[in-house]
Image (tube, coloured by chain):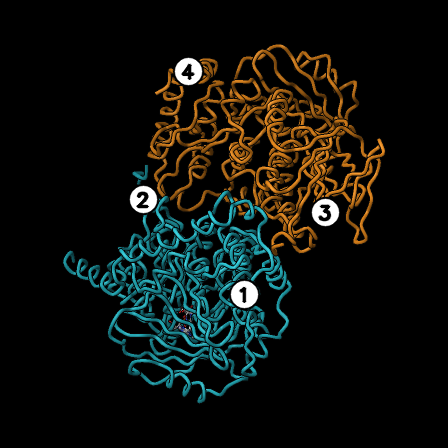
Chain colours: A cyan, B orange
């Protein structure tokens, strides 16, 4: 039914000016030229001299929908950005030193008589059965065996109950989208913005002034200028809401390294460190590493040393320190300025949520895209949706720090004992009680994610769903055994992750 | 004793033996075979609408699967017929009838949502009424029914259906099934309750002098809620948004089998007709602050030809904490709305399912109850909003009730939905909606609201092509629907002995 053609371009298009050519800027440009070619023209201003933040390599499964909505061929895109598949995050030493669990992109087990699997697991565990909840997650078992294949489209198949994301080279993703956007009419202007013109009557932005003297006019400005938040923060002065008391990490030191030979992990690793945690993101051609830390608990030098000492492979650059704050602007859309990406706010990369937030912002912007002057109702709605996303993610991140017994450093003592938002405290209590997850269907991180982190970090409920008692323990045990075997067998038949990627790449080169 | 047993609820007493009470008892005993479940049959409360009306929503299918009730048996026993939608008359400014049906309206044109394309065409006066693009609505208009197809590209795969219940027969069918389950049953009246130290209920004191203990009490006895009221009298009043607080309930002889109900606005409120084959249930809802009973009776008599009707008083609103200590209120004991959109029984069934999903330990820890109450609040407030939309934003201005409502303001969450729809045809997401986006759109458009702007994706598509494409869609639906046999024939075939099958 999509044979409907678009009309010849109507006259009054919105002139969209995007400030910034990082991941956020080019994602926005690509989406607008693709989805709203008849409603707007797109111009993007970026400065090579200022550069981009250049990290941000691990993503969430939602990004697949974004890539798909642009009509981009996944294999081509993955080859160009040296991307690997991601089935989850391996969290090490979080609950306590020596712990390890994968937060998988997928469900645990199968529900039985309308009761979620983990309740049966809890019940059998209390009856003395010793096994690991994560053995019942296809994504986890697959990740651990470093295999990968796309999920089955047959909803009855065990191999349909997971999702996947990408790990890519952040410095290649933007340029890939740039080529895409420019081909479809986005105009790029290189140079530094030195001044911003505001209409004195309306308070709306009128134009950006470039160092070259050029004036870039627009109707709607998308601020993708990164941490500096040049339009929303600097120019309009939108207030910053600080969350560093809950998320104290405010720096990172990054260090790309050569890949070790052998299989490539289809997952990101997050290892807790003395004053934060360290990421390890395997790409096709290298491994991204970084230590995210709290500068009030460790010095930059000590953090860099700790990172260098812990990486595998040969460093490919000098360690680079990045500074940030946890929090966000109170509103992301003010006047005719919408901030997307780091210019709107930042939540540290523990669960790879930043690019997802960029994507969510773009989706809402497209949905609420103005056709004339921006209506207040649209701004309000946009900001409400952004708040919702941030608040959910915030609580989920805090959980990773707070659900711990670690007392080996001042950092862990702080996060273990700090006061958490009421909304999180209640969620944790509810789970402790009987394995229930406060339910919502909109936003990131639904039930399986919460279960993974709770159980993975040692929060084991006292009770469970009473309906799980209805099944006979011997039958239940046998069914669980066979489910576990089925998962292992199904996964054993899948290709090795590195081989799968190699085959995909080869297929792309043949066709192109 | 295992940890699970220490924590577990061992006994449940359900108070009220109408449809809601029996449904609750059956659900609990089936899910929790080790729990002792008893029903106390108290005198029925005439205002317990979930026990008395014909409406349900499509989720009734899943509920029946859970309690082990087979649709075919119900239909064969005359306890239920199929319900695809409702015809709304005189709710809009232009007075044109429209249908709210349980299915999709139109199909998306690429990335453009159908209702956006429709809104644009409507402005250009090039659209048929919105419901004409919905197979379920077109079938409902013809009074026809077929079961939806599982095949994705079948024209009959785009809808769902509910059941229209004959309350007495349906109740009898449930009771017959309940009798095969290990439920104990007694008839009594509640004299009072005995409280525990922490504020819960330790036992019911019956008027005959007996005392009944349980770990959990489920009050399904209607708005009087003899057990729940003993703990708290708090009530969230919805009279401002849902003004009809009086119902006249009757029946009339006429009435074919049909997949459609009628809901017609009148000057004093609205009246309904729900055909059961051979007879139909009819009723009128009105607001006592605006209209007296005698006048309401005259309206019902003149519009529906029904002289005899039972008058029932309700108070719309909800119990803010339907689960308090070890007492759970379900059905009209927890939430009271009038008969609009037939949501009363659905809310009771949904509450039962949620209660099973969140069944707390024997201590009924406040934390666990809070999650139940939180979700219930989200669900019931959105139902209030959906129903209030019919009253507060209907294009109708003629008649005493509608004039009295003209100045009322909308609850915030409803105002938010209406604002977003009117601005650009968008519907903001809310958790725990009972009525999906298709339903909201059908009503918003049905009562005559139209977005001021068309969304840019739809606006970019060629108007002439879109118009031709919409016309083909409507024609296709009309043709396919014409091939469906009359409902009576369909029912006849469905009820033939199974030997003819395969
Ligand atoms: C340590 C760290 C790790 C991260 N890890 C992840 C991760 O694993 N997963 C994830 O999803 N996200 C991650 N992120 C976040 C992710 O990197 C960003 O969300 C993403 O890169 C988007 O950045 P951006 O485009 O908003 O900003 P930037 O990349 O900083 O781009 C800013 C742009 O604005 C331009 N600009 C600024 N000022 C001017 C000016 N005056 N004139 C002209 N141009 C100007 C710059 O030239 C640049 O093009 C991480 C972030 C950090 C700090």
Q: Disc 1 beta carbon < 8 A from ligand 1?
A: no
Per the model, the C-alpha gap separating discs 2 and 4 is: 45 Å
Q: Secondary structure at mark 1?
A: helix
Q: Residues within 10 Å of mark 3 (few under 14, many from 20)?
A: many
Return the chain for callout 1: A
B456 or B306, which is in the foreground?
Answer: B306
Residue at x 39%, y 61% (from the top left corner)? A140
Q: Secondary structure at mark 3?
A: loop
Return the chain for callout 2: A
Residue at x 72%, y 12% (from the top left corner)? B307
Dot 1 or dot 2, earlier in sequence: 2
Residue at x 62%, y 64% (from the top left corner)? A425
Judging by the rendered image, the residue that carries numbered circle 1 is A394
A296 or B95, which is in the foreground?
Answer: A296
Q: Quadrant of residue A209?
A: bottom left
Indicate whether B119 appears above or below A216. Answer: above
Judging by the rendered image, the residue that carries numbered circle 4 is B485
Mark 4 vs mark 3: tell me if same chain: yes
Per the model, the C-alpha gap separating discs 1 and 2 is: 45 Å
Per the model, the C-alpha gap separating discs 3 and 2 is: 66 Å
Q: x%, y% of residue B377?
A: 65, 46
Furthest residue in direction left, as rendered: A510
Do tag 1 and tag 2 residues touch (Cβ < 8 Å)? no
Circle nearer the viewer, 2 or 4: 4
Judging by the rendered image, the residue that carries numbered circle 3 is B326
- Residue A8 disc label: 2
Q: Residues within 10 Å of mark 4 (few under 14, many from 20)?
A: few
């Amino acid at each position: 039914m999509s044979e409907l053609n678009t009309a010849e371009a109507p006259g009054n298009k919105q002139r969209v000016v995007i400030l910034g050519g990082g991941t956020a800027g080019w994602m926005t440009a690509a989406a607008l030229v693709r989805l709203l070619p008849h409603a707007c023209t797109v111009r993007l201003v970026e400065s090579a001299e200022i550069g981009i933040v250049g990290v941000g390599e691990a993503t969430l499964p939602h990004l697949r929908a974004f890539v798909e909505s642009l009509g981009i061929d996944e294999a081509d895109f993955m080859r160009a950005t040296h991307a690997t598949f991601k089935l989850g995050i391996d969290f090490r030493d979080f609950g306590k030193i020596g712990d390890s669990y994968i937060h998988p992109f997928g469900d645990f087990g199968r529900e039985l008589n309308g009761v979620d699997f983990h309740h049966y697991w809890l019940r059998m565990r209390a009856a003395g059965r010793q096994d690991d909840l994560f053995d019942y997650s296809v994504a986890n078992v697959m990740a651990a065996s470093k295999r990968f294949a796309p999920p089955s489209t047959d909803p009855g198949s065990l191999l349909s109950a997971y999702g996947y994301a990408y790990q890519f080279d952040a410095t290649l993703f933007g340029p890939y989208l740039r080529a895409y956007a420019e081909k479809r009419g986005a105009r790029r202007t290189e140079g530094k913005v030195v001044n911003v013109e505001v209409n004195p009557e309306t308070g709306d932005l009128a134009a950006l002034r470039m160092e070259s003297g050029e004036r870039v006019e627009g109707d709607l400005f998308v601020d993708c200028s990164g941490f500096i938040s040049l339009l929303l923060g600097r120019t309009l002065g939108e207030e910053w809401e600080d969350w560093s008391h809950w998320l104290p990490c405010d720096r990172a030191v990054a260090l790309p390294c050569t890949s070790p030979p052998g299989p490539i992990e289809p997952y990101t690793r997050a290892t807790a460190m003395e004053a934060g945690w360290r990421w390890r993101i395997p790409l096709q051609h290298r491994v991204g590493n970084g230590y995210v830390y709290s500068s009030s608990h460790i010095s930059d030098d000590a953090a860099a040393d700790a990172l260098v000492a812990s990486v595998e492979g040969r460093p490919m650059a000098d360690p680079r320190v990045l500074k940030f704050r946890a929090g966000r602007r109170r509103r992301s859309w003010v006047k005719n300025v919408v901030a997307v990406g780091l210019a709107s706010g930042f939540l540290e990369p523990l669960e790879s949520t930043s690019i997802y937030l960029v994507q969510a912002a773009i989706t809402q912007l497209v949905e609420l895209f103005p056709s004339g002057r921006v209506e207040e109702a649209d701004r309000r709605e946009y900001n409400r949706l952004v708040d919702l996303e941030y608040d959910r993610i915030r609580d989920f991140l805090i959980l990773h720090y707070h659900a711990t017994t670690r007392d080996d450093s001042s950092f862990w003592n702080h996060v273990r004992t700090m006061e958490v938002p009421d909304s999180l405290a209640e969620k944790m209590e509810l789970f402790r009680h009987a394995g229930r997850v406060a339910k919502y269907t909109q936003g990131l991180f639904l039930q399986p994610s919460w279960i993974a982190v709770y159980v993975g970090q040692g929060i084991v409920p006292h009770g469970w769903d009473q309906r799980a008692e209805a099944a006979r323990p011997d039958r239940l045990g046998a069914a669980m055994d066979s489910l576990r075997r089925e998962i292992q067998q199904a996964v054993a038949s899948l290709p090795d992750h590195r081989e799968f990627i190699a085959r995909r790449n080869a297929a792309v080169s043949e066709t192109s | 004793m295992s940890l699970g047993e220490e924590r577990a609820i061992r006994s449940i007493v359900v108070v009220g033996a109408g449809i809601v009470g029996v449904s609750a008892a059956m659900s609990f005993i089936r899910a929790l075979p080790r729990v002792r479940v008893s029903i106390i049959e108290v005198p029925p409360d005439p205002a317990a609408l979930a026990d008395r009306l014909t409406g349900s929503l499509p989720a009734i299918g899943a509920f029946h699967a859970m309690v082990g009730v087979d649709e075919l048996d119900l239909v064969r026993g005359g306890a239920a017929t199929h319900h695809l939608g409702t015809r709304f008359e005189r709710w809009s400014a232009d007075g044109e009838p429209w249908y709210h049906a349980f299915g999709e309206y139109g199909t998306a044109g690429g990335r453009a949502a159908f209702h956006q394309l429709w809104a644009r065409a409507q402005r250009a006066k090039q659209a048929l009424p919105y419901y004409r693009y919905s197979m379920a609505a077109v079938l409902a208009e013809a009074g026809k029914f077929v079961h939806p197809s599982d095949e994705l590209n079948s024209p009959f795969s785009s809808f769902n259906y509910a059941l229209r219940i004959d309350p007495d027969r349906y109740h009898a069918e449930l009771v017959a099934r309940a009798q095969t389950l290990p439920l104990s049953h007694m008839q009594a009246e509640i004299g009072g309750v005995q409280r525990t130290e922490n504020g819960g209920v330790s036992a019911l004191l019956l008027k005959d002098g007996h005392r009944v203990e349980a770990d959990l009490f489920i009050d399904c006895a209607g708005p009087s809620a003899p057990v729940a009221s003993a703990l708290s009298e708090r009530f969230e009043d919805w009279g401002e948004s849902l003004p009809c607080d009086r119902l006249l309930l009757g029946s009339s002889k006429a009435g074919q089998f049909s997949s459609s109900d009628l809901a017609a606005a009148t000057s004093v409120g609205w009246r309904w007709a729900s055909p059961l084959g051979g007879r139909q249930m009819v009723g009128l809802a009105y607001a006592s602050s605006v209209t007296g009973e005698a006048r309401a009776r005259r309206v019902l008599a003149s519009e529906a030809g029904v002289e005899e009707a039972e008058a029932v008083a309700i108070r719309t609103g909800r119990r803010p904490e339907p689960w308090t200590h070890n007492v759970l209120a379900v059905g009209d004991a927890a939430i009271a709305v009038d008969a609009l959109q037939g949501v009363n029984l659905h809310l009771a069934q949904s509450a039962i399912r949620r209660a099973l999903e969140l069944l707390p330990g024997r201590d009924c820890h406040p934390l666990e109850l809070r999650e139940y109450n939180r979700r219930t609040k989200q669900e019931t407030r959105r139902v209030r909003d959906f129903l209030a939309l019919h009253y507060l934003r209907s294009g109708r201005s003629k008649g005493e009730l509608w004039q009295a409502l003209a100045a009322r303001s909308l609850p915030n969450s409803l105002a938010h939905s209406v604002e977003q729809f009117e601005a650009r045809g968008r519907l903001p997401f809310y958790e725990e909606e009972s009525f999906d986006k298709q339903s909201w759109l059908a009503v918003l458009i049905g009562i005559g609201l139209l977005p001021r702007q068309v969304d840019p994706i739809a606006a970019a598509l060629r108007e002439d092509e879109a118009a031709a494409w919409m016309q083909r869609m409507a024609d296709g639906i009309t043709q396919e629907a014409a091939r469906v046999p009359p409902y009576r024939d369909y029912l006849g075939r469905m009820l033939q002995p199974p030997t003819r099958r395969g």
